Image (spheres, rainbow, N blue to C red):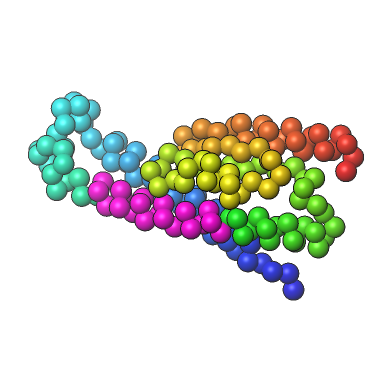
Amino acid sequence: MPDLTPFVVLGFALLVSILTGIVFGTVPAWLSSHAEPADALRGIQRSGGPVGDRASLPQRALVVLQVALSVILLAGALLMTKSLRNLELNLKEQGYDLRIMPYVLQLNKRDLPSALPLEEMKRQLLYKGEPVFEAIASKGNGVFETLKTIAKMVLLELRKGR
């Protein structure tokens, strides 16, 4: 029976990323859609008080939740190292070599204050000098570049006939 742990970790990380994007993209947009533009510009909330009063409790709760999720995602990044090694072993069992397979590393959530420095992530994850892209997927930063690069790499491999 194959070890499904890397797929479970990858699935969990994907699910958390999607849910984080939905929550942190939808809630602020929803809160903004209910504000009066003139009041928002003056710094007054619907409750009549200045910004920063008790009315901003949901916003502060979202920040706390975002920090908690960042810690979880950092743990996921560390598990990514193990998953990459497991991927190599699983591919080898199937007759493939990760050293010649095209892949890129996309380091997402780079706008979060808790994101590990780029050089640290590279030190832990680089395997064969593969391309590394920093991304902020919720803003679309780095996503197209990543997809374009992996598509080129796959097409080059297909032309080689491997």
Point out residue 79 in the picture as x, y percentages from the top left corner. Answer: 56, 59
Left or right relative to 108: residue 63: left
What is the quadrant of the C terminus in the image?
top right
Point out residue 28 in the picture as x, y percentages from the top left corner. Answer: 32, 41
In this rendering, the count of numbered labels is 0
Magenta-highlighted residues? 59-79
Q: Nearer the viewer, residue 140 or 6?
A: 6
Q: Residue at x 85, y 57 (%)?
A: 95
Q: Say whether residue 60 is magenta.
A: yes
Q: Nearer the viewer, residue 141 or 49?
A: 141
What is the quadrant of the N terminus in the image?
bottom right
Q: Examine the rendered structure and indicate whether residue 102 appears above or below residue 87.
A: above
Q: Residue at x 77, y 57 (%)?
A: 91
Q: Examine the rendered structure and indicate whether residue 36 appears above or below residue 120.
A: above
Q: Nearer the viewer, residue 22 or 13?
A: 13
Task: Kindly report the secondary structure that dominates the magenta region of the rendered protein.
Answer: helix
Left or right relative to 102: residue 146: left
Residue 27 lies in quadrant: top left
Point out residue 32 in the picture as x, y percentages from the top left corner. Answer: 28, 36
Q: Say whether residue 98 is magenta.
A: no
Left or right relative to 93: residue 149: left
Residue 34 lies in quadrant: top left
Q: Residue at x 31, y 49 (%)?
A: 62
Point out residue 46 in the picture as x, y percentages from the top left corner. Answer: 15, 39
Q: Can see residue 15?
A: no
Q: Residue furthest bottom?
A: 1
Q: Examine the rendered structure and indicate whether residue 94 appears above or below residue 46.
A: below
Q: Residue furthest left?
A: 49
Q: Residue at x 68, y 48 (%)?
A: 127
Q: Can see residue 67?
A: yes
Q: Nearer the viewer, residue 50 or 162?
A: 162
Left or right relative to 152: residue 94: right
